[in-house]
Image: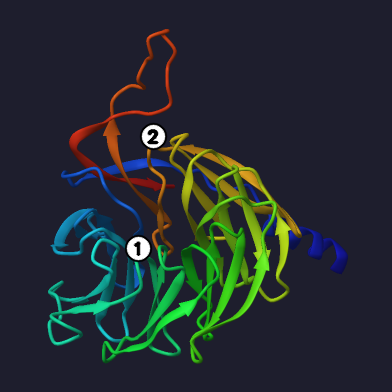
């Protein structure tokens, strides 16, 4: 009887995946430049980088509720709920903008008029809660800048990371993980001591960009330019699985035991799950739209948010062959909402 019950529970643990589809599109308008999106589930806020500004959406209503201007070349957003502050990485200005979560106003008493200098072209940015520090990952200078989130003081201006850093995640225990795009590696940063404490290869990945984390099972998911997702164990530094995904991924999100790769070139999401103990594979392909390459997950409402623009049809060359690139339609920036 006991063995029978174990089999029932095991089958339930690997039940059929839920079905997702596009359920809404939030019209924003404006230019066709964007990068990361960040979901603050606790406060029902979605933050989206958008060229020279950061858009703020209320996920309870899926309505635009504010805009943070002056975040030039913004890439990422980090939220410190315990401090009531938000931070953007402004790639064009090599700085971080600090803002108040309630008012969305820049906190001018922090840094210089609310701006904190970083390394060159800060891309990913993340808040590490145990140390109350913000870390930027600077693509052009191949380093990370550590900032005291309470005071805005720079703790370490340059932590060498040994390559071009991409997106990062935290484990809540003082460790930060980041993809190194040009070395096909993941690094671990010790937040307290502000140094790289470990690095490991995630070959056969080529060009890892987006990164997400399964807190319960402590697995990292990296999406790679060669159409694969790498599932790795940061404790052992080993690759666990290499499921196939679509083309042009830049972001990946985790929700309810599944990883979702945003495949901008294909206009799809690849949904990856653990179908048997230690076996990870695609369980669904979700249609989105061309160019929707970054993604954020609301882990309470089980919704996915992908910035994108409407586009025209693929261009046709002089020989009548259809190309891959499409021209964005002006003033069509929007957020594609995917749900169950």
Numbered tag placed on residue 287 in the rendering = none
The residue that disc 2 covers is: 290
Point out the image quarter for the N terminus: bottom right
Q: Which quadrant of the view contains residue 140?
A: bottom left
Q: Can residue 1 be seen in this snapshot? A: no
Q: From the viewer's side, name the closer residue of 131 and 91.
A: 91
Question: Is the residue under label 1 in contact with that under label 2 (CB below 8 Å)?
Answer: no
* Residue reaching furthest to the top: 319
Quarter residue 302 falls in: bottom left
Q: Is residue 45 above or below residue 153?
A: above
Q: Is residue 130 visible?
A: yes
Which residue matches tag 1?
A: 38
Where 131 sits versus 300, above or below? below
| Residue 82, quarter of picture | bottom left
Badge 1 element: strand
Instruction: Indicate left or right for 71 with 304 as reference.
Output: left
- Front residue of 9/234: it is 234
Give the image location of residue 28, x and y in percent: 18, 47
Q: Name the spot of residue 215 as percent of width and height, x first.
A: 56, 72
């Amino acid at each position: 009887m006991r063995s029978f019950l174990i089999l029932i529970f095991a089958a339930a643990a690997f039940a059929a995946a839920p079905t997702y589809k596009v359920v809404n599109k939030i019209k924003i308008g404006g230019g066709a430049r964007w990068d990361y999106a960040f979901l603050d589930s606790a406060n029902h806020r979605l933050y989206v980088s958008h060229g020279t500004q950061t858009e703020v959406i209320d996920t309870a209503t899926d309505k635009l509720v504010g805009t943070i201007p002056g975040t030039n070349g913004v890439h990422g957003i980090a939220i410190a709920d315990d401090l009531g502050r938000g931070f953007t990485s402004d790639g064009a200005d090599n700085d971080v903008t600090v803002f108040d979560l309630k008012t969305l106003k820049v906190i001018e008493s922090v840094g210089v008029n609310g701006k904190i200098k970083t390394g060159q072209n800060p891309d990913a940015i993340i808040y590490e809660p145990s140390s109350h520090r913000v870390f930027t990952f600077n693509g052009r200078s191949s380093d990370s800048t550590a900032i005291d989130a309470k005071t805005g003081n720079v703790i370490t201006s340059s932590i060498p990371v040994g390559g071009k850093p991409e997106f990062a995640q935290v484990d809540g225990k003082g460790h930060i993980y980041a993809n190194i795009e040009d070395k096909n590696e993941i690094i671990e940063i010790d937040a307290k001591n502000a140094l790289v404490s470990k690095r490991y290869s995630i070959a056969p990945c080529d060009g890892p960009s987006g990164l997400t984390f399964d807190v319960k099972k402590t697995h990292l998911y990296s999406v790679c330019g060669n159409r694969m997702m790498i599932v790795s164990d940061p404790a052992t530094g080993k690759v666990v699985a290499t499921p196939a995904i679509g083309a042009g991924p830049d972001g990946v999100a985790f929700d309810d035991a599944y990883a979702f790769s945003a495949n901008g070139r294909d206009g799809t999401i690849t949904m990856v799950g653990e179908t048997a103990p230690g076996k990870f594979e695609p369980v669904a392909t979700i249609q989105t739209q061309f160019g929707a390459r970054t993604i954020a997950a609301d882990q309470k409402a089980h919704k996915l948010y992908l910035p994108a623009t409407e586009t025209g049809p693929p261009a046709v060359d002089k020989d009548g062959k259809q190309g891959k690139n499409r021209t964005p339609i002006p003033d069509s920036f929007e957020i594609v909402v995917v749900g169950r």
